[in-house]
Image: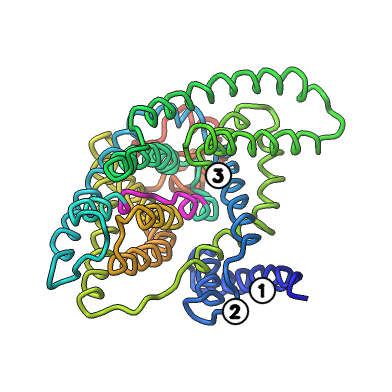
Amino acid sequence: MEGYKFLLDLGLILLSTKLLSLLTKKFQLPQVVGALLAGLLLGPAILNVIQETAFIKETAEVGVIVLMFCAGMETDVQEMKKCGKAAFIIALIGVIVPLLGGFGVAYFFNRPGVLGSDASASVMLQNIFIGIILTATSVSITVETLKELGKLKTRSGNAILGAAIIDDILGIIALTIVTSMTDSSVKLGVVLLKIVAFFIFSAVVGFLFYKFYTKWVVPNQKGLHRHVIIAFVFCLLMAYVSEAVFGVADITGAFIAGLIISCTQRSQYLASKFDVLSYAYLSPIFFASLGLQVTLPSMSSSVILFSVVLVIVAVLTKVIGCGLGAKLCGYQNYQCARIGVGMISRGEVALIVASKGASLGLMSSNLLGPVILVVIVTTVITPILLKLVFKWGPSQPIPAAEGNFSRNYEELAQFRGGILDERSEKPIPDKLKDHLK
C-alpha cells in the first residue's frame, strides 16, 4: 500500500491548494498565496503530513517548466524587444544591490561572538555567498500572480520577465566565480562560453522550428491536438538541452520555447490548452512543493535577529535595485514599484543556490536557517505586494467621445483588448478615440 501513497499525497495537495486559494481570494489576496500556504501547512514546517518525494519533486519541476512555457507564449515579443536594454540594466542593478546588501549583513553578523562559523570555507567567502543567494529571483511566483491579475502582457510584466531571465544568467556567473574559488574544476571562461552558445543555439533552433511549424504544421487544419504535442515536446527538449548541455536553468529554455511559439498562428490555442493543464494539475503541485521543502530550524536570539535583518534587506535591495534600474530606463514611478516588487521572491532558486553552497562548505548551519526564512517570507509576500502595487497608476478619466461614455486607462485597455494602462500617461490620441465612436 505504501507504493500508492503518492495518490493520497496528490489528492491532498490538489484539494488543499484549491481550498486555501479560494480562502485567500475571499480576502482579496492572490490565489497563489493559498497554494504556497498549503505546502507549508501539509509539510514538515507544521503538520508534517506530506514529505517531498521524488514523484512530487519531478512533477513540480515539470510544473514550473510548463508555467514558464505559458509565460513565454503569452509574452508580447515586440514589447520584449523594446525593453531588452532596460531589462539588462534592471537585472544588473538588481543583482549588484542585493549582493552588496547580503554581504554587508553577513559581514556584520557572521563573526565570532555573534553567529560564528563552522564551515570549512573562509568567512569572507561565506559572506559573499549570502549576497549571491539574495541576487536570486524566482520569477515563477510573479508570473502566476501576473497571470491571475491579467497583467502579464503589460510593460511592467515584460520588463520583469526579461530582467528575471537576465538575472538568472548573472546569478549563474556570480555563483560560478565564487564556487571556482573553492572548486578548481569550475572554470569561469567555460561557463561564459556555454551561456553565449546557448543563446546562439536558441536563435538557430528557434528559426528552424518556426519555419517547420508554419510551413508543415499550421497548414494542417485537422487534428489540432497534434499542435499541442509538438509544442510540448519542443518545450521539454529546450528545457533539457538548456540545463543538461549548456548549464542554463531549464526554465529559461522553456521560456524561450514559449517565446518562439508566441510568434506562430496557433499561439492562443496552445496557450489555452496548457493553461488548463497548468491550473488543474501542475501549478498546484509546484507551488505546494515549495512549502514542502521548508523546515523551521531551532535558532538562537542572535540568529533570529540576523534572520529578521536579512529578510528586510532581501526585500528592500530588490525593490530599490530593480526600481532604480527601471527609473534610469525611463519608467514611471508606479512602474518602477511594480518591477521592483515583482523581483522580490527568492523561492526555489535561493534554495537551490543554498544547497549548492552547503555542498561546497560555503553555508554554515547557522546561516542556513535565516536563508530558509528569507525564502518563506519573500515567496509569500511577493504576490500580496504585487496586487497592491498594480493598483497604482494613471486613473484620469478619458473625455467622452459621444454622450455618457467615460473610462479610465485600465477599463479602456480591457474594452479594446489592448494594454494601454502602462504605455503612456498622456491623453488618448484623437485617432484612437475615433475607433471608439
CA gap between label 2 and label 1 equals 9 Å
User: Which amino acid does the dot numbered 3 rest on?
Assistant: Met
Quarter the N terminus occupies: bottom right
Q: Please name the residue that numbered disc 2 is placed on.
A: 49
Circle 2 or circle 3, nearest the eye = 2
Determine the secondary structure under disc 2. Answer: loop
CB atoms of marks 2 and 1 within 8 Å: yes
Residue 391 seen in the current view: no
Determine the secondary structure under disc 1. Answer: helix
Residue sitting at x 53%, y 21%:
203
Circle 2 or circle 1, nearest the eye = 2
Q: In the rendered view, does 332 fall on the left or right side of 116?
A: right
Q: Please name the residue that numbered disc 1 is placed on.
A: 12
- Counting from the top left corner in percent of width and height, residue 361 is at 32, 56
User: Which amino acid does the dot numbered 1 rest on?
Assistant: Leu
The answer to whether 402 is drawn above or below residue 189 in the figure is below
Residue sitting at x 25%, y 79%:
300
- Counting from the top left corner in percent of width and height, residue 76 is at 52, 33
> Mark 2 or 1 closer to N-term?
1
- Counting from the top left corner in percent of width and height, residue 270 is at 70, 39
**Secondary structure mainly formed by the magenta segment:** helix
**Which span is picked out in magenta?**
133-143
Q: In the rendered view, does 335 fall on the left or right side of 406?
A: left
> Mark 2 or 3 closer to N-term?
2
Mark 3 crowdedness (10 Å alpha carbons): few <14, some 14-19, many ≥20: many
Q: Please name the residue that numbered disc 3 is placed on.
A: 68
- Counting from the top left corner in percent of width and height, residue 255 is at 54, 38
Quadrant housing residue 303: bottom left
